[in-house]
Image: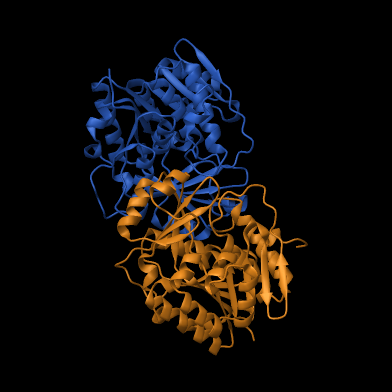
Chain colours: A blue, B orange
Amino acid sequence: MSARFDVVGFGNALVDVIAHADDRFIERESLVKGSMTLVDTDRALHLYRALGAAVEMSGGSAANTVCGVASFGGRAAYIGKVSHDDLGDVFGHDLRAVGVQFAPGRPMDDMPTGRCIIVVTPDAQRTMNTYLGVSSFMSPGDVDESVVADGRVLYMEGYLFDRDDAKEAFRHAARVAHAAGREVSLTLSDSFCVDRHRDDFRALVEDEVDILFGNEEELCSLYELDTFEAAVAAIRRDSSLAVITRGAAGASIISRDSIVDIDAESVAQVLDTTGAGDLFAAGFLYGYTNGHDLATCGRLGAIAAAEVISHVGPRPLVELRTLVPGR
Amino acid sequence: MSARFDVVGFGNALVDVIAHADDRFIERESLVKGSMTLVDTDRALHLYRALGAAVEMSGGSAANTVCGVASFGGRAAYIGKVSHDDLGDVFGHDLRAVGVQFAPGRPMDDMPTGRCIIVVTPDAQRTMNTYLGVSSFMSPGDVDESVVADGRVLYMEGYLFDRDDAKEAFRHAARVAHAAGREVSLTLSDSFCVDRHRDDFRALVEDEVDILFGNEEELCSLYELDTFEAAVAAIRRDSSLAVITRGAAGASIISRDSIVDIDAESVAQVLDTTGAGDLFAAGFLYGYTNGHDLATCGRLGAIAAAEVISHVGPRPLVELRTLVPGR
């Protein structure tokens, strides 16, 4: 069945505010390194004031992923909510600039565009503090159904589950996609996010999700199991395909009848791990929607993840299509 | 005479919007590589739409310089005008975050914060397109006289001369500084800027400027002379001290009785020349206001310039004080 888009991303539309700080900052502010925490206006202002000079660039997990798909030469669209402010303009520009169609939902100007204050520590880990702003006011009416119905794979963030309206929008989008004969994928996003919404996620994975993305820790948290092997057995019962990243150990692509292990690409220097999972998903989904086998899809994921962790910022700085061997 | 600040910067408060593009983009948009062009709203929107994904970070020539002074451990303040929008917040935060006191002038919210759309080409040259926004509405009443009077050296951009009110504010600030027994410095900013305001600049350099900053091309343009040697002879008549950068050839510090030549620092890879002159001035002024000889001042300038051209963005990414040998 033909489709205008390979991948339609759906998530919290955020601009990243990236600053470097040391481990003492993480301790002093009682942050949990490597995780994502939702913060209110006061806390966001406090953290921003406490941090040094920052750089602003578009982010948002699923938005990073669709930009990666476009960077491979894929056709992508994005559903997410921004405001008519400077950061909203930045977010929209940076999607369109790489060829992603942006479906921004209904306008609403009393809330600012969401932002994610990212603290990068010297070990290249990122600790994220998200002020959702207008992005969290996503509701079913904001979902452009024609866009969803025209994408081979709908890709949604677990982060959306932190607000009830967005959760409803998420379920609505999944139904629209399935009604149009499309596949639905979900990324678990963060092990704390899994912790907050485990039952909802489990039900979704059983009923609605065709492809699950996540890392080892998130998968174990989903099933409350201690070993990767046990979690793999569980996901094989629930989902036909799971793409699980394992940091420097690479990734495993788990289907009902096989497990394909993917090595990580070597990286001269890891500078900022922000976007690693988002870009692995981008490479995988570009390959998957363009007819490649699972091993090739995984290899494309590893190439994209390696590019994004070798510099500061959550999106590729080079055309990912130029990094594919033999092109 | 004691002073709260080593350096008080005064200039157009801008947030940089940095995108990479190739030489065909420069040609297609009829840009003049390496120069700064003032653009109106429509042209700024056109260029932004035509460019790829961008990164936002605080800029502004004199603002970059005072951040450099602070990065060496100096005490600095900045006078410039922003709006109450996202980019204005970013600009103020990034000054305060490095310890620079910000004197933003009287509020005015009908104009957005100014921005400079910077196109970085593969040869690391930057081509700047400035939408001044609220920054150009600087007038004498916006100058915090107590801040100016409390800085050892007032440092002002030639760029301010592109609007009459700002020019008047510039002259007012110079008078306040001199009345308080301070020194006044000016950077010529851009050879096209010199071209537009040559007579005003010449009069200023003769009457008000104690330290002139610029590059070889700007100095030659100021005096409409073809050789560096002839321009050096001219500036020695007009100004007691001139700090002239010469790209990879280093810099010359020209006083009435001596010329001190400074070698450029070696750089592994030049990635983006934005801020090179601003940061040379920062190192020089930090040294000058902290009692160092001219050769040491020049060396500090070269160290700061080398740091800023080795990465994308107009301000240092490391504490410049850590790069000073023997510290």
The front one of A140 and A92 is A92
- Residue B30 visible? The answer is yes
Residue B312 shown left or right of residue A96 in the figure: right
| Residue shown at the point (64%, 76%) measured from the top left | B233
The residue at the far right in this view is B326
The residue at the far front in this view is B226
Report the quarter where the N terminus of chain B lies: bottom right
The residue at the far top in this view is A257
Point out residue A311 in the picture as x, y percentages from the top left corner: 56, 42
Compared with B288, A325 (above or below) is above
- Residue B3 visible? The answer is no
Q: Quadrant of residue A67?
A: top left
Q: Quadrant of residue B52?
A: top left
Point out residue B289 in the picture as x, y percentages from the top left corner: 65, 76
Point out residue A127 in the picture as x, y percentages from the top left corner: 52, 45
Report the quarter where the C terminus of chain B lies: bottom right
Compared with B202, A300 (above or below) is above
The front one of B290 and A215 is B290
| Residue shown at the point (44%, 29%) measured from the top left | A72
Compared with A271, B109 (above or below) is below
Q: Quadrant of residue B205?
A: bottom right
